[in-house]
RNA sequence: GCCGACGUGGCGGAAUGGUAGACGCAGCGGACUUAAAAUCCGCUGGGAGCAAUCCCGUGCGGGUUCGAGUCCCGCCGUCGGUACCA
């Protein structure tokens, strides 16, 4: 930038203060038991979602949340809290490995470079992190504890009775067999259909498939042996325990929907003597089941398929097997399916209904089999109409419909809305012409002993009946699946597991961390064999013992990093007892971290996984709260100047380094906060950056001016005088508003108030230095460099001022007496429209104000000829004269 | 389709049910300057009027209220998430 535009020397004082904070360790906070720790101070834990250090470096989205938490951190410190505010790196991940594959360079090198770049960029922004607590998920000292936590999961099971994780040792004591125990572990091995990507040489999570496909990699479906984590055991607690958290309602809902609890019943049908259980949320519609559908992968399909249908069924199953879950749903414009030739017996009426297979039924949900009720389920309706399967109405929409008597309706040829028809070998049913498909609650019809009952009661009654007859039970189902926890990558935590005689076994804790071996090359083999299996010497331990060659997903490290920050250098435990007790448990709330800020993209998975791990650690007594994050705030996306999402291809990416070069870190910080509400999506504007830059320049010029030689010298207008009443008022109003706005995280309005204050001070002929010092104090959390610099200059020139750093001073108290106005402007309305304004003494009696209002010429002219019905006086605000 | 968020000047955005548009950007006018930049001061929702002033105005249509951007009901639109979950 040109010298001319540099209105204050931020390029000189910003690095100076950053170095000052770093050498003095201004923002390092001691742990209990360490020198300087003050146990009388309340703790406050402010956490940012740590970044994945990509090669592209920081983008302007990062400093948005980071600045918000930085302001909160600095404010809480001034308010007297011990504030824990750390930063670290989520450094495992596929891009580093892809880089290694292309260059042959170890991913560690690439990762280290990226981390150094990220750290440099963050330090340039003057954030008040305690860098002594920095963590890196790829650090062996960190990997050690990630693996240790995995072993806690491996060595635990979920006890249904207490709804808590318990040590496996208890099952061993009960004499359970090895197979029984392995079937109960929270970390277990299962054969699961996965998304295999040959190019990358790894399986992908469902949510990753789209991303890599778009980049031109093929992804196919394969059954593979995988490590799974039993998160489903915690489904109910993951729903229930959201209640005590200060999270946006939308995010809570998102999690609840993801877990997807649904109440219903499992009902046993029979197919040729063979029992087939279906799950339904509408057991009350059992009389309306006109066919059954099995998932194509259902184990019973082979046995029930008749010879005539065998070819068709086989062909259909083959096409389904090739498709991923995604494709199955994408291509689902039209329903497909094949009749098996078999029939099932409906337990409630003995009716024989055809059994189909169709890919709209998933093996992985419920029992993989459904009873189809086309009259009351959209999907079944679509399928039934397509394949000409009968539709029976068993739920009337109104009570009147439920009362319609069979004898009163005509035959299908009649014109009325209802008619009677026959279905199957059984009796006659009422048909309703005007309803295509009704999936709401209503009243049971055509349903024998349920007839006339409202849906909820019909459900209760049929479930009781099924239970009595041993034909079914009430059940709860969750959409949530167990967490597929293994990847075939190199750049992730190896599992601390060995295999012997086909069985897995944990390695001793003393052998942790188990690090991945160096490899000759990082090219995937093309087979689903994990990359680590190339390291034959590492894998083969002799005596038929081999290492597990899968690695953990990137989520693993981010599941517990907030715990490690509390005691980042502890070599004995993942977190020391004392540190845990102080930083995580001392707020009297279920959640540990007091404020967690990050993007919505992690609203479901990261937050759900971390909550799950935390609960396991809680159950096992390793942490003392049931939830990791008490308050959650999602910052909104920052769009490019064109209002589009920032992307390289659009060329609308803003690089924070460039902004800092041109306007300084304080201006970048301030602009990010001034753009609008934190949670909102908002477009970037360089003009807007210039606007806040000009504001900072105005603050600078309150204190400094240039002399003849062009050097910065103290502003001659400065004076060690008592501020006048108006100045005092605006300064104290600013202290009040900025404090309140930081607490409600309304940073944009806090900045606007400081602008107002600055504009007022600028207008003064002689500016009281005490007022400026107060302004600098409240502006400090937002623009820490500029304010410290000016404060130091000011204090050097005026001995009456406190010479200490702003960062270490208490937040100033405002004086309410200074905010009180002598006179208040009152708005006079007639019938709700503003007609006049007048000044009255503060605290004037309502009667007095009313009298003045009615005496107003303007008011009089508007009520002329009308009768005054009512006069409303809002003290200190307005008078509304109602007249007609 | 379902779920969620949002809809206010030319733009970003302010407004415990009580003066709509704070603050900033852009624009216009003025001061300073040989000139420009920077800076400082003023104006700036639309319409009518010489003016005082008046009328209209927070996506659309209703409602509650003395009073609605704000609360309620019904629509429309934009963005985000999700999708055969029985």
Image (cartoon, coloured by chain):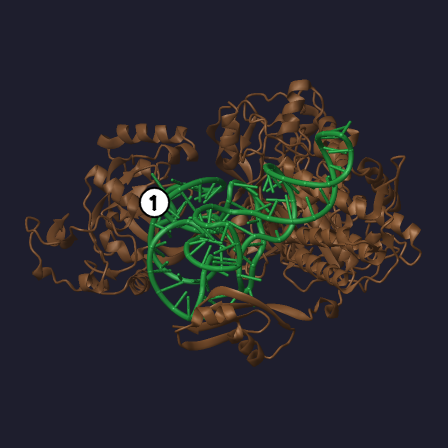
Chain colours: A brown, B green
Q: Residue at x 84, y 40 (%)?
A: A13
Q: Which image quarter: residue A316?
A: top left
Is residue A397 or residue A446 the one in the foreground? A397
Q: Position of residue A505 (x, y in %)?
A: 64, 40
In the depicted view, which residue is nearer to us: A22 or A732?
Answer: A732
Residue A567: horizontal and vertical position, in percent? 77, 50
Q: In the rendered view, does B39 fall on the left or right side of A556? A: right
Q: Residue at x 77, y 62 (%)?
A: A728
Residue linked to disc 1: A369
* Tag 1 secondary structure: strand
Task: Determine whether, in the image, residue A165 is placed left or right of residue A378.
Answer: right
| Chain assignment, label 1 | A
Q: Is residue A285 visible?
A: yes
Residue A204: x and y, percent? 53, 32
Q: Which residue appears at 29% of the width and 50% of the height?
A: A269
Quadrant of image for the N terminus of chain A: top right
Q: How many marks?
A: 1
Q: Residue at x 46, y 66 (%)?
A: A832
């Amino acid at each position: 930038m040109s010298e001319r535009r540099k209105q204050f020397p931020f390029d000189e004082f910003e690095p100076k203060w950053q170095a000052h904070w770093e050498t003095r360790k201004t923002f390092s906070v001691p742990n209990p038991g360490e020198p300087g720790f003050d146990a009388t101070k309340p703790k406050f834990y402010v956490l940012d979602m740590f970044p994945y250090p990509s090669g592209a470096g920081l983008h302007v989205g990062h400093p948005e949340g980071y600045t918000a938490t930085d302001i909160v951190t600095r404010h809480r410190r001034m308010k007297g809290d011990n504030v824990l505010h750390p930063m670290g790196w989520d450094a495992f991940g596929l891009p580093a490995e892809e880089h290694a594959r292309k260059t042959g360079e170890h991913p560690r090198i690439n990762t280290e470079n990226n981390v150094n770049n990220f750290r440099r960029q963050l330090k340039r922004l003057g954030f008040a992190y305690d860098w002594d607590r920095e963590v890196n998920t790829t650090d062996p000292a960190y990997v050690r504890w990630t693996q240790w936590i995995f072993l806690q999961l491996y060595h635990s099971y979920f006890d249904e009775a207490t709804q808590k994780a318990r040590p496996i040792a208890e099952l061993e004591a009960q004499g359970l067999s090895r197979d029984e125990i392995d079937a109960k572990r929270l970390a277990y091995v299962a054969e699961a259909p996965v998304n295999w990507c040959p190019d990358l040489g790894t399986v992908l999570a469902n949510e990753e498939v789209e991303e890599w496909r778009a980049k031109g990699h093929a992804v196919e479906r394969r059954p593979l042996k995988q490590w799974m984590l039993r998160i489903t055991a915690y489904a109910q607690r993951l729903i229930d325990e959201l209640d005590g958290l200060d999270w946006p309602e939308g995010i809570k809902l998102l999690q609840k929907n993801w877990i997807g609890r649904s109440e219903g019943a499992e009902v046993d049908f029979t197919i040729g003597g063979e029992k087939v259980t279906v799950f339904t949320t509408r057991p009350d519609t059992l009389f309306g089941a006109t066919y059954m559908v099995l998932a194509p992968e259902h184990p019973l399909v082979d046995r029930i398929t008749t010879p005539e249908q065998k070819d068709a069924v086989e062909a259909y199953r083959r096409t389904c097997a090739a498709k991923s879950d995604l494709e199955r749903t994408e291509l689902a414009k039209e329903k497909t399916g094949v009749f098996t030739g078999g029939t099932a017996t409906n337990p409630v009426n003995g009716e024989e209904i055809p059994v189909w297979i169709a890919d709209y039924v998933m093996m992985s949900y419920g029992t993989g089999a459904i009873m189809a009720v086309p009259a009351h389920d959209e999907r079944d309706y679509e399928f039934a109409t397509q394949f000409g399967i009968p539709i029976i109405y068993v739920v009337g929409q109104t009570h009147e419909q439920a009362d319609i008597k069979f004898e009163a309706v005509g035959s299908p040829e009649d014109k009325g809305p209802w008619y009677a028809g026959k279905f199957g070998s059984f009796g006659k049913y009422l048909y309703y012409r005007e309803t295509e498909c009704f999936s709401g609650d209503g009243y049971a019809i055509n349903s024998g002993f349920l007839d006339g009952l409202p849906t909820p009661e019909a459900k209760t009654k049929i479930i009781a009946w099924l239970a009595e007859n041993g034909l079914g039970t009430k059940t709860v189902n969750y959409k949530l699946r167990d967490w597929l926890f293994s990847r075939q990558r190199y750049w992730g935590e190896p599992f601390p597991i060995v295999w012997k005689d086909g069985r897995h076994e944990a390695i001793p804790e003393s052998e942790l961390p188990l690090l991945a071996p160096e490899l000759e090359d990082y090219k995937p083999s093309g087979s689903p064999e994990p990359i680590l299996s190339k390291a034959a010497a590492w894998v083969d331990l002799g005596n038929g013992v081999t290492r597990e060659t899968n690695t953990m997903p990137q989520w693993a490290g981010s599941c517990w990093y907030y715990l490690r920050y509390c005691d980042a250098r502890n070599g004995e435990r993942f977190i020391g007892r004392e540190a845990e007790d102080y930083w995580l448990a001392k707020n009297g709330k279920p959640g540990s971290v007091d404020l967690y800020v990050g993007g919505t993209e992690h609203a479901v998975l990261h937050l759900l996984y971390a909550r799950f791990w935390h609960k396991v650690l809680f159950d096992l007594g390793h942490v003392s709260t049931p939830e990791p994050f008490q308050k959650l705030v999602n910052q909104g996306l920052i769009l490019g100047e064109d209002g589009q999402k920032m992307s390289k291809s659009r060329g609308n990416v803003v690089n924070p380094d460039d902004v800092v070069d041109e306007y300084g870190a304080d201006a970048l910080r301030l602009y990010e906060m001034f753009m609008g509400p934190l949670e909102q999506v908002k477009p970037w504007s360089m003009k807007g950056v210039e606007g806040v830059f000009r504001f900072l320049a105005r603050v600078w010029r309150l204190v400094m001016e240039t002399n003849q030689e062009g050097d910065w010298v103290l502003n001659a207008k400065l004076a060690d005088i008592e501020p006048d009443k108006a100045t005092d008022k605006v300064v104290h109003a600013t202290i009040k508003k900025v404090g309140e706005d930081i607490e409600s995280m309304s940073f944009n309005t806090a900045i606007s108030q400081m602008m107002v204050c600055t504009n007022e001070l600028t207008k003064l002929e002689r500016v009281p230095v005490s007022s400026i010092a107060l302004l600098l104090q409240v502006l400090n959390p937002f623009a820490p460099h500029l304010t410290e610099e000016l404060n130091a200059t000011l204090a050097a020139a005026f001995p009456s001022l406190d010479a200490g750093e702003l960062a270490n001073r208490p937040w100033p108290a405002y004086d309410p007496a200074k905010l009180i106005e002598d006179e208040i402007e009152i708005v006079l309305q007639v019938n709700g429209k503003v007609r006049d304004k007048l000044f009255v003494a503060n605290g004037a009696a309502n009667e007095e104000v009313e009298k003045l209002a009615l005496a107003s010429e303007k008011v009089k002219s508007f009520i002329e000829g009308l009768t005054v019905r009512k006069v409303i006086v809002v003290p200190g605000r307005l008078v509304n004269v109602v007249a007609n």
